[in-house]
Image: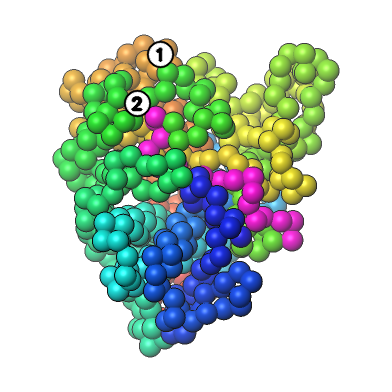
Amino acid sequence: MKLISFKHSFIALATVLSLASCDNDEKLEVKGDGVVLEKDFYKTEKDAYSGLIAAYDKLGKYAGAMENAPLLLLNSASDDFYAGGGNNADQPGLQVMNNYTVSPTNIPPAVWSNYFQGVARCNIMVVKLPEIDMDAAKKARFMAEVKALRAYYYFDLVRLFGHVPLKLTPYTREEISVTVQATPAMVYAQIEKDLTEAIADLPITLAPDELGRFSKGAATALLGKVYLYDNKKTEAAAELAKVNGTPGSTSSYGYKLLDKFSDLWNHKNEFNTESIFEISYSSEGNTKWDNFERGDDEGNLVSQLSGMRNFKRTPAGIAAGIPDYINGWGFMVITSDLGNTLKTDPRFASTIFDAAAQQAAGNMTYDPSYQETGYHFIKYSPVNSDIGTSEGALNFGINTYIIRLADTYLMEAEALGGTGARAQALLDAVRNRVGLPSVPVSIPAILAERRLELAGEGHRWYDLVRTGEAASKLAFKGFTANKNELWPIPYSEFNNTKMVQNPGYN
C-alpha cells in the first residue's frame, strides 16, 4: 500500500496500520503476514516509525477521497463553487452540501470518521511512544509530530462540527457508551496545548525524504491560525509574525513568496519556498477502479473529479497552446460570481479555465456539468501526460497546500485588526507579487484578497462562517443562519453514545 503523507515513497514498508479506535484487541494489518495484535506492536523504533506514518496517512483524505474529501465538500458549500458533476444526484454527499439540504442521514459519514481515525492513531502513539526503546531525540520529535497532527485533526473537527468528543487516549469498549462532547473552548484549549508543546521538538528544516512532515514553521503557522479562529488575535499575530518575517523577504524559517503566482501551480514545483504545510500525493497510489469509492482510496481524486467532462482540444486549440487537460468528471464548477470577479485579476489564468469562451472560439469541446457556468477550476488540474498507469486517473501525483505563505500573510494582517503599517505591508506583498497596486488595508480588503488569492484551496467557507458573512453570501444556496455554520454529525455516530446533535438537525 502507498501511504501518501510524505514525499518519500513507502511502497516497501511492511506494516500498514488499520486501527479501529474502539476495539480492546486492536489489530494491525501487516502486508503479507495477516494480522498482529496491537499489544505486540510498538516495541521498536521501526514500529514507532510505522505508527507515525499511520498517523499522517489520514491527511491524504483532504483531496484523496470521493464525496467525503473535505476539499470537495468545503468548496461545494462555498459561494465560489457548485458541486457540479453529471446531474443533481451525482455524488449526493457533494450535492447536499451545495444546496444545504445536508442532514445527519445524508452527510458522508467518512468526513467525521476519517478525522477521528487520525486522532485515534495519534492517541495510540502518545501512549505507546514513551515505552519504546529508541533514540531520545527522535522519540521527542515523533511525539511532537503526533501532537501536531492531533491538533490538526481536532482543529478541522471543531470548525466543522463544533461540539465533538475530546479523547486523548485510546477508547476502551466501556467508554463508548458514555461518550459525550466537549465544548469548543475545551477543544481549542487542547489544540493550543498540543501545538505549543510540539513546536519545541520539531525541526526547522526537513530532509528531502521528510517533506510533508510537520516542521517548526508549519506547527507555528497552524498555532497562529488556531489562535485567530479562537479570537486570540494578539497571540495569533505574534505566532504568524514568526512565520512571515519581513513581508516580501525570506523569513527565519526560510519561507518566501514565489516570484510568480503561476509557479505555485506548476505541479513539478513541490515543497517550494511558499509552502508551509503540504500534502504529498503520488502516481504510485493504491487507488483502483474497484476501490475508489469504498474508502480505502489513496490517490488525489480531486484532480480527476474537477476535470472537465469529455474535454477535447481542436487543432486550433492545440495550435493556440490550450493545455491537454484530462477528461474529468466535471465537479467543482466555479460560480459566475467568482469567475467574473477574478476575470480581470492576474491570478485568473492560474485559477480558472474559461471553457465557455474557449469553446466559442473553436479551441476545444466539452460536455457541460450540472449547474454549468463555463468556468472550471484548474489549480490542481492534470494533463494527459500526468497519467502514469492504466489506473493513473485515480492516482495523480499532484500535491495540495494546507497552509502557504500568502495565507499566513493575510491571516496576520487580519489578526492585526486590518490596520497599521505592518498589516499594510503584508497585504501589499500579496498584491505586489501579481502586479496589483496597493489598496488601503482593512478587514474587508484582506478578506477580498483571501478570496481571490486562495480560491479553491478550501478556505472560503471557513472564512465566511468565522466572519459572520455566511448567511448573506450563501443565501442563494439555501444556507440557514444559526444552523449551517456547523455540519450535522452523521447519524451513525450516535449508536450507544450520549452525544447530542448540532442545533437545527434534529
Please tell me which residue lies in front, 81 or 433: 433
Q: How was the colour assigned to the protein in this rendering? A: rainbow
The residue at 55%/24% (across/down) is 350
**Image x and y of residue 27, in percent:** 51, 79
Is 20 above or below relative to 66? below
Which quadrant holds residue 22?
A: bottom left
- The answer, for residue 411, to whether it is visible in the render is yes
Is 500 on the left-hand or right-hand side of 398? left
Q: Report, in whole angstroms, how far the alpha carbon at label 2 lies from the one at label 1.
A: 18 Å
Q: Quadrant of residue 413?
A: top left
Q: Tell me residue 53's x, y (percent).
A: 46, 59
**Amino acid carrying mark 2 in the image:** Lys
Seen in the image, is 243 located left or right of residue 478?
left
Residue sitting at x 40%, y 45%? 462
Q: Which mark is residue 400?
A: none
- Magenta residues, as a range? 273-290
Residue 99 visible to the viewer:
no
Q: Residue at x 63, y 26 (%)?
A: 353
Q: Foreground residue, 319 or 495?
A: 319
Chief secondary structure of the magenta portion: loop
* SS category of the residue bearing label 2: loop
Toward the bottom, the furthest residue is 174
- Mark 1 lies on residue: 436
x and y percentages locating residue 207 in the rendered image? 40, 42
What amino acid type is highlighted by mark number 1? Leu
Q: Which residue is mark 2?
A: 256
